Image (tube, grey):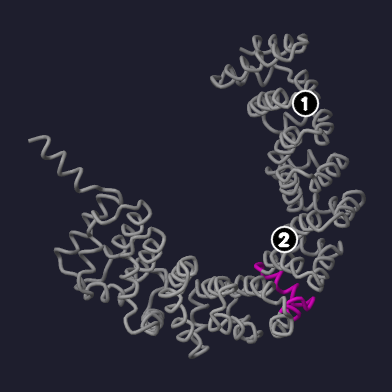
């Protein structure tokens, strides 16, 4: 096989007709798709691919795509570092190839190398190659740019790579790209923040480079959209303890709190508030007590947005509340706000019952997060809290959820069943379900579910009920629950009956 392939590659180089070359490429592609391990090893050891690189200069796009397909298959036979060591000269040249498919091909191979920490030194030895990769972050083709960004993020996680990135020509290349335009500068900021959040060393180096301060300055831009983009990137840094501490030291967090406090003074604040909500919501998910105690104005603003019912930013506010509520610590921090959560839950009930479908589903999804408690964390205190929150929603909160589970629309029905699964995972919810007229029969009835997603969501409810506390459901019902789970989410009773009748 190796000999055949080498002959074909030589013949390919001798032909002048593009069509004949395409025919050979098609033959090679078919052969490469049916290799065994022994043939792959022979090819890896004995076949020279270099003649294929020479034909990537063609103006025939289809032909270039075909050559790239073959090279990709051949690269897959070799270890990534072998590809680089054999063809480093060609790789360096092809990074600036006019065809995006070629640039993407070689950058993907480099990404495979740097994804293995033990192989990164291969690339670090070639600073000019690193500079070429950095420059590709500014590529017009987004796929090429993203691949280059991923390579730099991996290199930035390596202590030696970090030193090289933030010195000399690589540093200057980053700086030049920052000055190009907003789109490219935010790609650079994304790489810088990813490096900064990867390690304490990465944070220190990123800070010393001056690039983080440049990103902070963007938060003071008069362009609200630039501020929103900067917030989104900085949120990733704030999700690390050292990153959040650094943002506080630099007074970035205090300035963001001020923006929330002064939101009513800026007619464009509605554009910025969602980004601020996401930032503080994500941070409060991990450190609720710190955010709630240090920045009460943020929490007040969150509940004000929910209470206002402003549909343009209500979805983000609900997502933020859901994020904060995901962990038990967040639930207790919210409980300490006394009437704030019961009032918010009443508003969520209003949204669920009367607002546009997208917001209703948003509200249901976040209600599931607010009420959910992992089994291992369930105790009397937290279950008492989630029960009180659910009861505060309206006069008949379970009836509201049941009505949604009976809706003929898959999205609402599924979201309702997902809330039901959360209720079914807690003792008080199991008691509510057992005493609600007709609800158990509805949950066990497979024939009324026609949507795949809803069948699976209902199955999750029954899976929770199988583990219900003793004496809530009678033995017959518990056996039906177990049968339901054993049969799987897509079991069809009608098909079974037909099969039995056919066998008689």
Measured as percent of width and height from the top left, residue 91 is found at: 80, 31
Q: Which residues are magenta?
A: 239-256
Q: Residue furthest left?
A: 504
Seen in the picture, residue 168 relative to 68 is either above or below; the reply is: below
Q: 258 or 487: nearer the eye?
A: 258
Residue at x-position 49% and y-position 69%: 359
Residue closer to the observer: 114 or 4: 4
Query: Which residue sits furthest bottom?
Result: 338
Are there few (<14), some (14-19), or many (20+) residues within 10 Å of tag 1? Answer: few
Is residue 477 depicted above or below 19 in this figure? Answer: below
The image shows residue 332 at horizontal and vertical percentages of 49, 82
Q: Quadrant of residue 28?
A: top right
Mark 2 residue crowding within 10 angstroms, few (<14) / some (14–19) / many (20+) = some
Rendered-image quadrant of the C terminus = top left
Task: Please report the residue visible at 68 percent of the width from the left and 67 percent of the height from the top.
Answer: 235
Q: Is residue 476 left or right of residue 367?
A: left
Residue 4: numbered disc:
none
Q: Going 11% across and 35% down the picture, which residue do you hit?
A: 503
3D distance between C-alphas at marks 1 and 2: 33 Å
Residue assigned mark 1: 86
Residue 62, position as x, y percentages in the image: 69, 25
Residue 301 drawn at (x, y percent): 62, 83
Query: Is residue 496 on the magenta stretch?
Result: no
Q: Which residue is mark 2?
A: 199
**Earlier residue among tags 1 and 2:** 1
């Amino acid at each position: 096989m190796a000999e055949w392939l080498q002959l074909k590659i030589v013949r390919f180089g001798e032909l002048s007709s593009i069509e004949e070359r395409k025919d050979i490429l098609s033959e090679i592609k078919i052969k490469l798709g049916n290799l065994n391990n022994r043939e792959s090893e022979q090819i890896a050891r004995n076949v020279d691919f270099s003649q294929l690189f020479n034909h990537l200069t063609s103006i025939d796009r289809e032909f270039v795509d075909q050559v790239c397909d073959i090279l990709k298959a051949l690269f897959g036979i070799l270890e990534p570092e072998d590809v680089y060591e054999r063809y480093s000269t060609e790789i360096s040249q092809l990074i600036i190839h006019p065809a995006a498919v070629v640039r993407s091909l070689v950058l993907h191979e480099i990404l495979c190398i740097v994804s293995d920490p033990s192989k990164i030194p291969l690339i670090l030895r070639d600073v000019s190659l690193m500079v070429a990769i950095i420059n590709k972050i500014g590529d017009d083709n987004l796929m090429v740019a993203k691949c280059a960004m991923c390579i730099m993020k991996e290199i930035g996680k390596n202590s030696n790579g970090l030193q090289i990135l933030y010195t000399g020509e690589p540093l200057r290349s980053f700086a030049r790209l920052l000055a190009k335009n907003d789109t490219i500068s935010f790609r650079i900021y994304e790489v810088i923040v990813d490096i900064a959040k990867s390690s304490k060393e990465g944070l220190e180096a990123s800070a010393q480079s001056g690039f983080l301060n440049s990103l902070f300055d963007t938060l003071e831009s008069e362009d609200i959209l630039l501020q929103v983009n900067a917030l989104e990137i900085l949120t990733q840094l704030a999700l690390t303890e050292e990153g959040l501490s650094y943002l506080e030291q630099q007074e970035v967090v205090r300035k963001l709190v001020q923006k929330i406090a002064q939101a009513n003074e800026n007619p464009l604040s509605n554009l910025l508030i969602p980004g601020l909500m996401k930032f503080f919501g994500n941070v409060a998910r991990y450190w609720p007590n710190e955010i709630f105690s240090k920045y009460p104005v943020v929490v007040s603003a969150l509940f004000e947005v929910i209470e206002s019912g402003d549909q343009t930013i209500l979805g983000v506010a609900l997502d933020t509340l859901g994020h904060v509520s995901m962990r038990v610590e967040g639930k207790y921090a919210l409980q300490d706000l006394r009437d704030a959560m019961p009032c918010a839950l009443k508003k969520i009930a209003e949204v669920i019952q009367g607002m546009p479908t997208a917001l209703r589903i948003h509200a249901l999804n976040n209600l599931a997060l607010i009420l959910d408690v992992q089994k291992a964390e369930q105790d009397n205190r937290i279950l008492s809290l989630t029960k009180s929150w659910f009861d505060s929603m309206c006069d008949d909160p379970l009836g509201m959820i049941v009505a949604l589970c009976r809706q003929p629309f898959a999205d609402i029905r599924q979201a309702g069943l997902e809330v039901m699964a959360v209720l079914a995972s807690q003792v008080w919810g199991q008691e509510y379900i057992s005493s609600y007229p007709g609800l158990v029969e509805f949950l066990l009835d497979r024939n009324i579910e026609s949507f795949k997603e809803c069948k699976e969501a209902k199955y999750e409810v029954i899976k929770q009920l199988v583990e219900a506390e003793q004496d809530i459901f009678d033995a017959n019902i518990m056996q039906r629950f177990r049968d339901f789970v054993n049969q799987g989410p897509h079991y069809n009773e009608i098909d079974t009956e037909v099969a039995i009748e056919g066998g008689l």
